[in-house]
Amino acid sequence: MSGHSKWANIKNKKGKADAQRANVFTKIGRELAVAVRAGGPDPESNSKLKDVIVKARANNMPNDNIQRCIAKASGADGGADYEEITYEGYGPKGVAVIVETLTNNRNRTAADLRHYFDKYGGNLGQNGCVSFMFDKKGVIIIEDDGETDEDELMMKALDFGADDFTSEDGFFEILTDPDSFSAVYEALSEDDSLNFVTAEVQMVPQTTVELTDEDDIKNITKLLEMLDDNDDVQNVYHSWDE
């Protein structure tokens, strides 16, 4: 695993998200609304909503915004009606790609995604064609400021249910079972000194694909950028070893 590149890309992606905060908040707002409609407005009885709230807070979404989104989704009209659709496919050299979307027009979304994959050396596949190569995990990444006691942080994370803890290139990565994710995050977030880079349930690849051809690298980079910039796309997971 090319650790330095991996962590650099995580931080760069976070920086891009910060620069496009309004768009990020809009996408998270949709996730909140869908979670409320699926399981109700109480995060204590709606684990999906609880996880999205954690994601919102890790992305510095103000609590007032979060509560407004929940209240709106709980109203009579429930806001716009979005459909959750997951697409799977391959990028250059067989890089596995999973795209989670929320859309009010599945034909538009499917056409856009098919165009991106075809243009940049990949292809959309059937549901299930790549998801078996990923594991669903809670992922918490914290930036190491040089003052955090690594052993203490690790023990606290493990005590509250984390499965794995690693330290690399100035970051701490904590992996959890999806069911333990919120509890681990809440326990760690009590420490105001910790800088959370990301905290959300993700699809983590079991193996990664290394690309060496410059054209393949350009194509996968452009494909991921186009997917991230699409308003219907919520999350993108892939097996490229960046």
Image: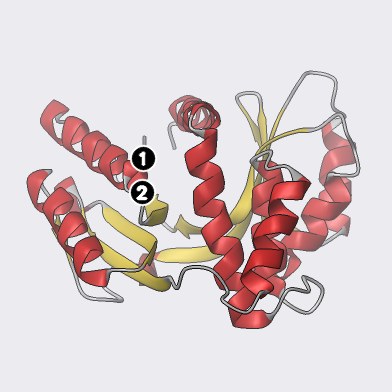
Classify residue 224 as left or right of residue 108. right
Instruction: Tell me, yes or no, whether the two marked residues, 1 and 2, touch with CB atoms within 8 Å.
Output: yes
Q: Which residue is mark 1?
A: 241
Q: Position of residue 174 (x, y in %)?
A: 69, 48
Q: Position of residue 152 (x, y in %)?
A: 90, 39
What residue do we see at 70% from left, 79% from top?
A: 40
What residue do we see at 73% from left, 73% from top?
A: 41
Callout 2, which amino acid? Thr
Mark 1 or mark 2: whose residue is earlier in sequence = 2
* Image height of 116 relative to 110, above or below: above
What residue do we see at 58% from left, 74% from top?
A: 78
* 150, 59: nearer the viewer: 59
Identify the secondary structure beneath mark 1. loop
Callout 1, which amino acid? Asp
Q: Position of residue 163 (x, y in %)?
A: 71, 59
Around disc 1, counting alpha carbons within 10 Å, would you say few (fewer than 14), some (14 to 19), or many (20 or more)? some
Q: Quadrant of residue 229?
A: top left
* Identity of the residue furthest to the front in this view: 76
Which quadrant would the C terminus be assigned to in this image? Answer: top left
Residue 208 has which mark? 2
What residue do we see at 49% from left, 31% from top?
A: 3
* Image height of 184 relative to 5, above or below: below
